[in-house]
Image (cartoon, rainbow, N blue to C red):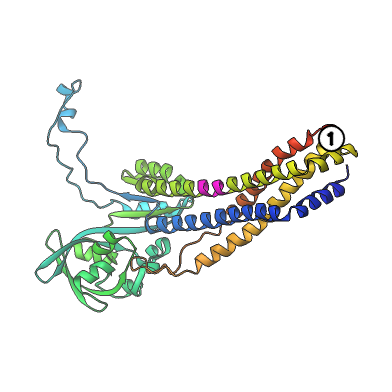
Amino acid sequence: MNFRLIFSIAQSLMLARWRQTMVAAFGVTFGIAMFVSLLGFMSGLNDLLDGLILNRTPHIRLYNEVQPTLKQPVDMAEAFQDSYNFVKSVKPKQERPEIYNNAAIMNFLKSDQRVLGIAPKITAQVFYNVGVIDLTGAVNGIDVEAENSLFNFQDYMVDGNYIDLKNTPNSIILGKGLATKMLASIGDIIQLTTSKGERLQLKVVGLFQSGLQDADNTQSYASLVTTQKLLGESISYITDIQIKVKDIEMAPQIAKEYEQLFNVEALDIQTANSQFETGSSVRSIISYAVGITLLIVAGFGIYNILNMMIYEKMDSIAILKATGFSGNDVNRIFTSIALSIGIVGGILGLVLGLSLSLLIDQIPFNTPSLPTIKTYPINYDPRFYLIGICFSLITTYLAGYLPSRKASKVDPVIIIRGK
């Protein structure tokens, strides 16, 4: 079997029908280019949308949740041990939202090899006093450096410097929407009132915008010390411990472990953001489905072209078989034609797809809700290109294999007698 001769014959057949060959190759090129650019754009969009939530959400959150007491006094009475007790109008337990012994907990977490970092936090419900109007909202007391290290807090700053929150006593960073409602800017003094009636004046040192309108319209950030002062609590008062782990997939398992170990509520990121993960999965499935459909359509085009080529070249096939070429040789000739179209079209498709991705990546995307995003998001994951070229070869091989089987079974005597 002479491979060089087989490839030479395949080349001659392709050049004899060069227009049809170019159409088939262009179909593969277009399919691969759309597949790569579509997946890159949709994946980049998923990363952007998920990042709005997931980058601002700890992998595990430790906190104390206000909830009714599960075990009532009647359950402890010996006379009712073997009875079913029904208690109505059960009130929540009278306990503070503070995490007790939080210093020891944080020291333990820092020594855990699975933990990437921690950031303590205080959540305080407040009223923003604007003249005679009170706006409801929340102040997040944070360790500024830890918050920036874990959640890239500086990326959401649209005015001012986040580190001023640490360096300036009694300071606050407002959400962009909240600052607009209050007509507040950097350097202004605003007044807050807690649910207990405590009041404190704070200096605005920055504005942030997360892209989530509800958060930007109600939330603000202050240092831990300032928030503790606002609430009238000691320097050990902490309501939340935010944790980022090295393997996010292990977050649910680690959260259950911490919940039992520290006797607190532990919320993992998968549970907190299950809807966003579902949306990302659906968008990815749609992208793959559309891209693969394009490649399958291109494969049918190649199949039709090779089928017509075989029909028109029946006499040439008969002569090849009459001069000593076997059915397998004829099969290899037309399979070579299909794979050549797939390889050339696939490579050109990858180049065109990369070019389209680079072009989309330069298109301006300016929106007030996402000030840190300047262009449309694109993901240049090499897996998309590898999947594209592999699927291109598989599709074109199958598109060429079926007609080539038909060509390999041609009886040269019948064809020559018919001619």
Q: Residue at x 31, y 43 (%)?
A: 263
Q: Secondary structure at mark 1?
A: helix
Q: Is residue 117 visible?
A: yes
Front residue of 403 and 342: 403
Horizontal side, residue 251 vs residue 228: left or right: right
Against 383, residue 165 (above or below) is below
Q: Which corner quadrant of the image does residue 321 belong to? A: top right
Q: Residue at x 40, y 42 (%)?
A: 257
Q: Residue at x 69, y 52 (%)?
A: 20
Q: Does residue 176 show up magenta in the picture? A: no
Q: Residue furthest bottom?
A: 187
Magenta extent: 288-294
Q: Is residue 175 visible?
A: no
Q: Quadrant of the N terminus?
A: top right
**Mark 1 crowdedness (10 Å alpha carbons): few <14, some 14-19, many ≥20:** some
Where is residue 208? Give x, y as percent.
Answer: 32, 68
Where is residue 230? Give x, y as percent.
Answer: 20, 65
Q: Which residue is mark 1?
A: 412
Against 141, residue 90 (above or below) is above
Against 257, residue 25 (above or below) is below
Q: Residue furthest front?
A: 419
Q: Quadrant of the C terminus?
A: top right
Where is residue 55? Give x, y as percent.
Answer: 40, 58
Front residue of 16 and 104: 16
Q: Amino acid at mark 1?
A: Pro
